[in-house]
Amino acid sequence: MDIQKLIDDYASWLKQEITFEKVGEYYEITTPYLDNANDYLQIYVRQIENDIYFTDDSATIRNLKMEGFQFTAARKKHLQRILNQYGVKLEGDELTCKAPVSSFAQKKHLFIQAMLRIDDMFTISKAKVSSLFLDDIQEFFSEKDIFYSDNVQFTGISGFSHNYDFLLQRSKTKPERLCQAVNNPNKSSMGNILFAWNDTKPARRNDSQLIVILNDQNTIAKGIEDAFLNYEAKVVRWSERNKDSNLQLFAAS
């Protein structure tokens, strides 16, 4: 596998698929990433002196509310966790952030990641009003005495930083394992994770692994598992987390 060529191909595809136009004081940037309604994510940017200001024009939160999504106390806590993770602020329903012009590419990358993660909250199982997928995984790890660090960030060979939900430390018998929880296993979330992993992996130890935990209480889009496996990621369906082979993936020894 020519990892560098795959990364270059993905970056080239992204560049071709991103469009922009001037809208008042802002530039409207349309990305190839899809939200839960299969609409392309759009962000708005403008420059004031040496800073770039980003906004989603309230679209992310507004769309969730239009679909009937209720922000319970637990969901507000989860929302704030995402905002903190990606360095984004919430002003009313509007997602915002700013960065120096020199950091535009990195901040744009993180801002889009935040939009995708917040939009992903729509797929929370209706049977679980007060519980979220990340919380469920943390409870499972605690129950099984699986020790981890959460909300970790690594810089890839592109210079971009990528967030991972969990890090399972290297031991005498196990390699370093980076874990991503995938609440809504679709092509957008898959592509996003694989780009991050292919960018991160060359900067980590040769034996480092990626584990993706798929919430199969939600529909897993066709081909998602095979795509992860083709990129040598370890795939764990949430309903099969207690299988011996899966428990061994998480174990320290």
Image: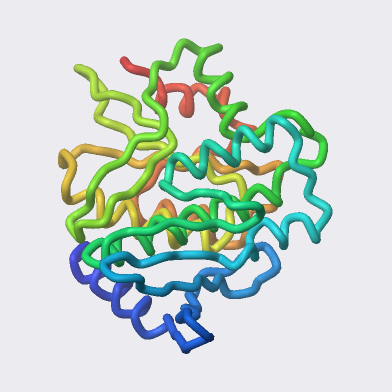
Residue 83 relative to residue 195: left or right: right
Instruction: Report the front residue among 112 and 97.
Output: 97
Can you tell which quarter of the image residue 37 is in?
A: bottom right
Instruction: Report the front residue among 125 and 54.
Output: 54
Q: Residue at x 39, y 40 (%)?
A: 164
Residue 222: % across, % down: 61, 62
Q: Residue at x 16, y 47 (%)?
A: 203
- Is residue 115 placed above or below 253 in the rendered structure? below
- Is residue 3 placed above or below 39 in the rendered structure? above
Residue 66 relative to residue 199: left or right: right
- Is residue 36 placed above or below 47 in the rendered structure? above
Residue 177: % across, % down: 32, 33
Q: Which residue is drawn at 23% across and 48% down?
A: 155
Residue at the extreme bottom of the image, as rendered: 21
Instruction: Report the front residue among 84 and 252.
Output: 84
- Is residue 12 placed above or below 199 in the rendered structure? below
How many tags in the picture? 0
Q: Residue at x 49, y 53 (%)?
A: 114
Residue 83: % across, % down: 50, 44
The quadrant the N terminus occupies is bottom left
Residue 57: % across, % down: 60, 67
Q: Which colour scheme is used?
A: rainbow
**Residue 210 visible, this angle:** yes
**Residue 227 visible, this angle:** no
The quadrant the C terminus occupies is top left
